[in-house]
């Protein structure tokens, strides 16, 4: 059976076209997703707040608009879900923290508002981290005894299982990319400064934390490309957002790209299957791109120490008043030394990218593991959070025990289009997301 035969397995791109062209109604699509959530969510615990009545009402309104030839957006009638770290108006957003169990924001995060303005329909909120005190544990749809990893755990799990065509996650050190890898879907961490962080919970100061981004997650690369321009651009509230044009990913000449790849480095020890998957993906690109070669960026092993020093710095829990989120003991000199080391790391990597358009790596040291087992570190995703470059996670293989294995495609800053184009090549060659058995 084709992945596309079931309504809930179709891409958001396909659904948007079919709704516009009258091949299917928005209500049929939302009903299919709600029934799929009803079937799979009791075992996954991925969707933790469901907006079924609101979604059905919005779907009927979307169908009415089409029937009376009213203007429609690029996502008209297409349902989506949102990580419970991103605000949705008049709907619980707890962050999985019992201290905020009754938190109900009054307005949407900018990215959510833009999706709604484009016609998309909110299905509900998804769980965060692997386990939390508010909603409990989320399971991996490919094996319920296994972890989906975090922190966009519920988002990756419900998308992989067909409950939602696409959604929003957030990523500081790998929180879109790691769950996408573990659950076998595609996820994009956009270039820092492309998508507003307005409405992220907890509050993110983009000056203090230039690592965190909001980005799309989906089963198909084309859907990441569909959503990205909708959520991008200044909102005149997040001062870090730059009005940088987004190039057309379909116009990238992949044959001219120069690719570096690596699997091992001093702090990364991938499993044999992880190593083989990345090398296979590199060989696919070698048959297409101008140059593909093994090359390790300088200072890559410094990423964890830089991140550890960052984690020791305080952040404000409030956007308007300095409210430290914890105790700290760093001296002013230690903070300045940390910023210097971070800047030196960024300068080293941007010099490396003078010779390459893309870096290909594993996403994680190992595939998803059973709950409670060591998941390994995040030595592949962490460096490119520190640089703020666009990164795409995509399923490229399968472990001996049947779990997805992803690769990470890193592009130059602001070249999100290149990451998407290379992702499309690998998805077509290696299959990408695989339907659940």
Image (cartoon, helix red, strand yellow):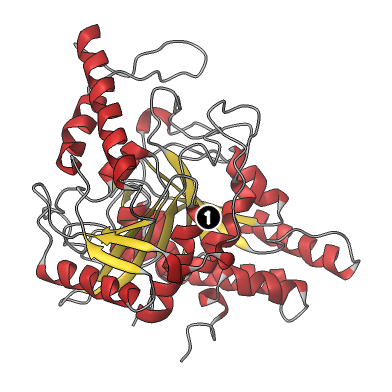
In the picture, the quarter occupied by the C terminus is bottom left
Residue at horizontal 30 percent and vertical 63 percent from the top: 407
Q: Residues within 10 Å of mark 1 (few under 14, many from 20)?
A: many
Q: Nearer the viewer, residue 428 or 24?
A: 428
Q: Nearer the viewer, residue 274 or 77?
A: 274
Q: Residue furthest right?
A: 68
- Quadrant of residue 274 in the image? bottom left
Q: Nearer the viewer, residue 323 or 217?
A: 217
Q: Which residue is mark 1?
A: 81
Q: Nearer the viewer, residue 397 or 356?
A: 356
Where is residue 354 shown, x and y percent of the image? 36, 47
Residue at horizontal 49 percent and vertical 38 percent from the top: 93
For label 1, the SS is strand
- Residue 285 left/right relative to 111: left
- Residue 132 left/right relative to 38: left
In this rendering, the answer to whether 242 lies above or below 401 is: above
């Amino acid at each position: 059976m084709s992945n596309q035969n079931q309504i809930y397995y179709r891409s958001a791109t396909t659904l948007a076209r079919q709704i516009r062209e009258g091949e299917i109604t928005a209500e049929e699509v939302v009903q299919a997703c709600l029934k799929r959530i009803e079937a799979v969510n009791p075992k996954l615990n991925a969707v933790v707040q469901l907006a079924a009545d609101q979604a059905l009402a919005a779907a009927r309104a979307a169908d009415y608009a089409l029937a009376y030839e009213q203007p429609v957006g690029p996502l008209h009638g297409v349902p989506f879900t949102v990580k419970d770290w991103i605000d949705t108006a008049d709907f619980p957003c707890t962050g999985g923290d019992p201290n905020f169990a009754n938190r109900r924001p009054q307005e949407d995060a900018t990215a959510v508002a833009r999706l709604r303005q484009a016609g998309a329909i909110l299905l509900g909120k998804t769980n965060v981290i692997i386990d939390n005190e508010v909603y409990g544990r989320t399971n991996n749809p490919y094996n319920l005894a296994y972890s989906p990893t975090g922190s966009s755990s519920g988002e990756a799990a419900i998308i992989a299982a067909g409950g939602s065509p696409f959604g929003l996650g957030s990523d500081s050190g790998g929180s879109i990319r790691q769950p996408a890898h573990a659950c076998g879907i595609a996820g994009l961490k956009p270039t820092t400064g492309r998508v507003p962080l307005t409405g992220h919970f907890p509050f993110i100061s983009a000056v203090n934390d230039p690592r965190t981004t909001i980005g799309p997650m989906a089963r198909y690369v084309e859907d990441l490309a569909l959503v990205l321009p909708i959520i991008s651009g200044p909102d005149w509230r997040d001062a870090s957002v730059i009005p940088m044009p987004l190039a057309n990913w379909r116009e990238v000449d992949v044959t001219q790209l120069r690719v570096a790849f690596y699997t091992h480095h001093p702090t990364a020890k991938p499993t044999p299957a992880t190593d083989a998957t990345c090398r296979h993906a590199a060989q696919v690109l070698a048959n297409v791109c101008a140059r593909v070669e093994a090359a390790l960026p300088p200072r890559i092993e410094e990423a964890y120490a830089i991140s550890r020093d960052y984690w020791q710095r305080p952040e404000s829990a409030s956007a308007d008043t300095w409210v430290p989120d914890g105790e700290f003991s760093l001296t002013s000199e230690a903070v300045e030394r940390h910023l210097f080391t971070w800047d030196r790391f960024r300068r080293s990597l941007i010099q490396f990218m003078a010779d390459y358009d893309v870096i290909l790596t594993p996403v994680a040291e190992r595939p998803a593991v059973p709950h409670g087992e060591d998941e390994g570190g995040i030595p592949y995703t962490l460096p490119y959070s520190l640089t703020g470059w666009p990164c795409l996670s995509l399923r490229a293989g399968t472990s001996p025990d049947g779990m997805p294995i992803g690769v990470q495609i890193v592009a130059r800053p602001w070249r999100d289009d290149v990451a998407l184009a290379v992702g499309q090549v690998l998805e077509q060659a290696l299959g990408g997301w695989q339907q659940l058995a």
